[in-house]
Amino acid sequence: MKSVIGFLLLLVSASAFAQSPADALIAHELQSSRAYETLSHLTDDIGARLSGSKGAAYAVTWATQQFREWEIPVSNEPVKVPHWVRGREEAQLVSPAHHQLVLTAIGGSVATPAAGITADVIEVDSFDDLKTLGAAKLRGKIVFYNNPMDMDLVRAHRAFEAYRIAVAFRGAGASRAAEFGAKAIVIRSVGSASLRTPHTGALHYDPKQPRIPAGAMTAEDAMLVHRLLARGKRVRMHMVLTPRTLPDVMSANVIAEIRGSEKPEEIVLIGAHLDSWDLATGAIDDGSGVAMVMETMRLLKEMNLRPRRTIRAVLYMNEENGLRGGQQYAKDHGKEKHIAAIETDAGGAAPTGFTTTLKGDALAALESRTKPLAAVSSNHFEVAEETGADTGPLTAAGVPGFGLVPEPLHYFDYHHTNADTLDKVDPKELAQDSAAVAALAWILAE
Ligand SMILES: [Zn+2]
């Protein structure tokens, strides 16, 4: 018996000696993560962080202070951001029966006249439908885009693909309908679940078309309108939206770094966006990503691990409705030597791996060194064209991109709705994510 225990002890100590810094980072993070504490503060104490808002400004100050407390060099780099403010948002069906609807303005929407708009609702499910109906049928109407997310894709863990398809109508629907004289648009909220939770997000107005108001009603309300229209009823809607676009505001990206010991001019970037939509506190989008990035830096500092290359953390401002932070970073730093750009902007559920723009031999070479990631189920790389919105300009210029992929099954149940709150994040899963980001950053920086 004694010899068996002795043998086991020997094995344990041998494996402890064999532990690489990446293994140690993961083990330490899983034991003593403070990522959830960081996320709690960002969401519960600071709140919503739409660019230009007080919450966004406070988040910049707080994150900067936090890095300073951890004794990690940090700076703020100015970014000019849009300042859009949501106003009243009300909608009812006035015919064939009275129904109060739950609707939210799509980010960037213009207001309705003060008294609101009352008009017939015409349903479409594609841009081709607009052409078929033409201006004769659409002029003066409220165009209703009824495009549910493809739940087969969501259940196949390809929720981001389903999102990209459905979101086209939120982004371009207003201008496409305005081309045919529509007065306003409403879309079916983009999302994979609904308890009458409307889903916001950005739109893009085509400068050649008149700007018309745009709202998103809940899936339940969209189904009601669809049923009434399918039964041949004339559906009339009244809606009031009073959002305003105020002058641009000066804000900042928060940038912290741990300088490399051998090749400080070579940079491994890790980033997430500090802003959120205004309907909730952005716990999954992208408070979780911010917490992982801050935690990676805290962990490296706490463990006194100095990488060969520089690990630089960027908390981007204004991903949601402008991407100005990512663009500004690329403008100011694009000429520096970035070895890799890791972005985490896909929630805080358990990690499953990373997307990457690396291919072929380069990817195989990296994979031979990422075995420690298996401890948090993240040693899986899927080749993708895009690995993140804020790092898009860098990866387009050839910097290898990486995007953390937390399990996406429930991400779009809450994303951009008033249900994106701290309770949706599991502290253990967030620690696993943080460990995955920290270990990959370390491996790339070595
Ligand atoms: Zn996001």
Image (tube, grey):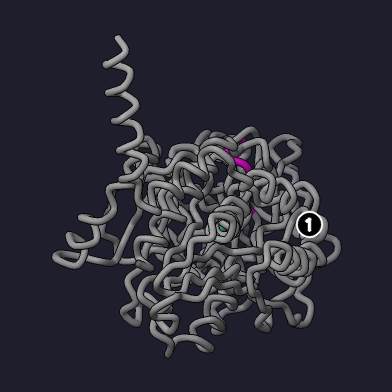
What's drawn in magenta, residue-wise? 216-220
- Whether residue 219 is in magenta: the answer is yes
Q: Nearer the viewer, residue 35 or 415?
A: 35
* Residue 446 visible in rendering: yes
Rendered position, 62 above or below 438: below
Ligand 1 in which quarter: bottom right
- The N terminus appears in which quarter of the rendering? top left
Residue positioned 57% across, 61% down in the render: 301
- Residue 101 on image: x %, y %: 72, 41
- Residue 314 on image: x %, y %: 56, 70
Q: Residue furthest right?
A: 114
Q: Residue furthest front?
A: 2
- Residue 239 on image: x %, y %: 75, 54
Mark 1 residue type: Val
Residue positioned 59% across, 78% down in the render: 324
Residue positioned 38% across, 57% down in the render: 440
Q: Secondary structure at mark 1?
A: strand
Rendered position, 1 above or below 350: above
State the residue position of label 1.
240
- Residue 177 on image: x %, y %: 53, 66
Along the horizontal axis of the image, is 282 left or right of 2? right
Q: Quadrant of the rendered structure where residue 140 is? A: bottom right
Rendered position, 151 above or below 145: above
Q: Nearer the viewer, residue 116 or 156?
A: 156
